C-alpha cells in the first residue's frame, strides 16, 4: 500500500489554518481530544470504580457518557494545548532555564509602625 504524500500534505495544508499559532492550537487540540478518548475508553474498559456498571444501569446512559466525555475533552485538551504554549520559546529566552540575577546591594529601610488599638469585645 503506497500513499501519495504530496496529496496528503496538500490536504493537511488546506484543512489547517495558515497562522502558526492557530496551527499549533489545532494540532495540539486534536491530540488532546485523542488522549481524552483514550482515557475515556480506558475508564470504561477497566470499569474503574464501577463506572461502566453505573452507566449501564442508568435510566438514560447517554447523559453520563456525554458529561464524562465532554469533561475529559475540555480538561485534557486544555492541558495539552497549555503545555504546547508553555513550551514555545520567548523572544528573550536564552535557553538556560534561569532568570538573570540582578546585581546590586540590599539596603535596609527602617519602617515605623504604630501599635493598633485592641478591638473591644462586647
Image (cartoon, rainbow, N blue to C red):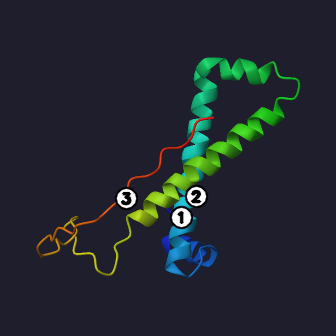
x and y percentages locating residue 4 in the rendered image: 52, 69
Q: Regarding mark 3 in the picture, which secondary structure is present there?
A: loop
| Residue nearest the viewer, comparing 45 with 75 | 75
Q: Residue 29's quadrant in the figure?
A: bottom right
- Label 3, residues with CA under 10 Å away: few <14, some 14-19, many ≥20: few
Q: Quadrant of the C terminus?
A: top right
Q: Give the alpha-carbon distance from disc 3 to disc 2, as whole Å.
A: 59 Å
Question: Which residue is the extreme one toward the right?
Answer: 59
What residue is at 82 percent from the left and 35 percent from the top? 62
Q: Which residue is mark 1?
A: 27
Q: Earlier in the sequence, mark 3 or mark 2?
A: 2
Which secondary structure, mark 2?
Answer: helix
Q: Report which quarter residue 25 is drawn in.
A: bottom right
* Residue 114 badge: 3
Q: Residue at x 34, y 73 (%)?
A: 89
In the picture of the structure, the residue carrying the numbered disc 2 is 30
Residue 50: x %, y % from top left: 65, 17
For image coordinates 55% across by 70% down, the residue present is 8
- The front one of 92 and 42 is 92
Amino acid at each position: 500500500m503506497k500513499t501519495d504524500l504530496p496529496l496528503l500534505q496538500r490536504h493537511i495544508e488546506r484543512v489547517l489554518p495558515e497562522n502558526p499559532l492557530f496551527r499549533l492550537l489545532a494540532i495540539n487540540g486534536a491530540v488532546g481530544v485523542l488522549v481524552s478518548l483514550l482515557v475515556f475508553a480506558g475508564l470504561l474498559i477497566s470499569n474503574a470504580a464501577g463506572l461502566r456498571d453505573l452507566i449501564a444501569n442508568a435510566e438514560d446512559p447517554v447523559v453520563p457518557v456525554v458529561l464524562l466525555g465532554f469533561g475529559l475533552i475540555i480538561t485534557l485538551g486544555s492541558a495539552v494545548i497549555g503545555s504546547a504554549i508553555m513550551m514555545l520559546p520567548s523572544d528573550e529566552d536564552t535557553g538556560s532555564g534561569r532568570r538573570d540575577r540582578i546585581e546590586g546591594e540590599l539596603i535596609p529601610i527602617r519602617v515605623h509602625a504604630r501599635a493598633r488599638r485592641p478591638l473591644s469585645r462586647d
